[in-house]
Amino acid sequence: MARVDKRILGLVAHRLAIFAYVVVALFPLFWLLKVSVTPTRLLYSEGVRLWPSEMTFAHYAFVIENSSFPQFFKNSLIVSLSTAAIVTLVAAGAGYAMSRFSFRGKLWLVGLLLVTQMFPLVMLIAPIFRILSSVGLTNSLTGLILVYTAFNVPFAVFLMQSFFDSIPKDLEEAAMIDGASRFMAFRQIIVPLTLPGMAATLGFVFTAAWSELLFALMLISKTDVSTFPVGLLSFVSKFGVDFGQMMAAGVLALIPAVLFFLLIQRFLVQGLTAGAVKG
């Protein structure tokens, strides 16, 4: 009986810990939504409440109709999707080469990729700004895509290499014995098996590019090419902060990320459960 009681207590404690984690993780999102539907006059007068006594969607209407947020939104979509697609394609090829081939300088290349992840980003802003200025790519979405691609490729290569390492070489070797070229074996056999890995890479890079602020703030000064993290600063003035409109813009900015992960969740689940059913 005592052993059963311990199991029950352990199960209850486990469930309570998960519930507490979920509450802590989701509470900022709940507060974001709560402030976005609270009338400005009640933001400070009501004190701390879990939900406002009145609701309004005026903040959302202002953000969509009377601000530059739709343009910020469009720019972020272009930059994030382009960066995610380019990085995933590059990482797939490089990760496959790192996994399947031995070549001179491979260890040096791995070390170089690791070193690129060790530098604080703040140290690199000045040289990157100077380089992009010399070729006319500041205040440009193209320049921002190039910078995001350069900084996300190293981690994505290691991520994709780990997925390729988990696939037996015998599969593509058997295909090549049957007459397939290496590229055909890669395209028809390896790529379908690594779709979960590509989905994970896409999700990681998209999220990183979608929420990045530092380089976007330093390299972009024109409103028409600003991304939404920079655009959120437009709700901050020297006289105050319009929290209602800022939070409404934040809620709207969550929509693409949520939709993107809903589209790729099937592949993400496959990647997470692949190890559990192996063998």
Image: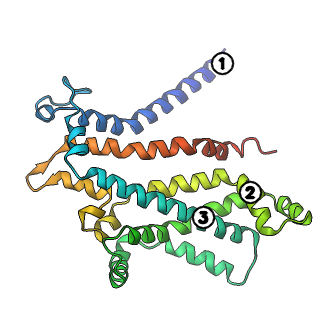
Badge 3 local density, few (<14 within 10 Å), some, or many (20+)?
A: some
- Determine the residue positioned at 20% across, 42% down: 62
For residue 185, side relative to residue 117 (left or right): right
Quadrant assignment for the C terminus: top right
Residue corresponding to mark 2: 166
Image coordinates for residue 91, horizontal then vertical, percent: 60, 66
Say whether disc 2 or disc 3 marks the residue closer to the N-terminus: 3
Three-letter code for the amino acid on which mark 1 is drawn: Val
Of 12 and 265, the residue lying toward us: 265
- Label 1 sits on a secondary structure element that is helix
Image coordinates for residue 22, horizontal then vertical, percent: 45, 34
Residue corresponding to mark 1: 4
For residue 119, side relative to residue 157 (left or right): left
Residue 275, compared with residue 131, is above or below; it is above
Three-letter code for the amino acid on which mark 2 is drawn: Ser
- Determine the residue positioned at 44% across, 58% down: 80
Residue corresponding to mark 3: 89
Badge 1 local density, few (<14 within 10 Å), some, or many (20+)?
A: few
- Determine the residue positioned at 25% across, 39% down: 60
- Label 3 sits on a secondary structure element that is helix
The mark lying in front, picked from 1 and 3, is 3
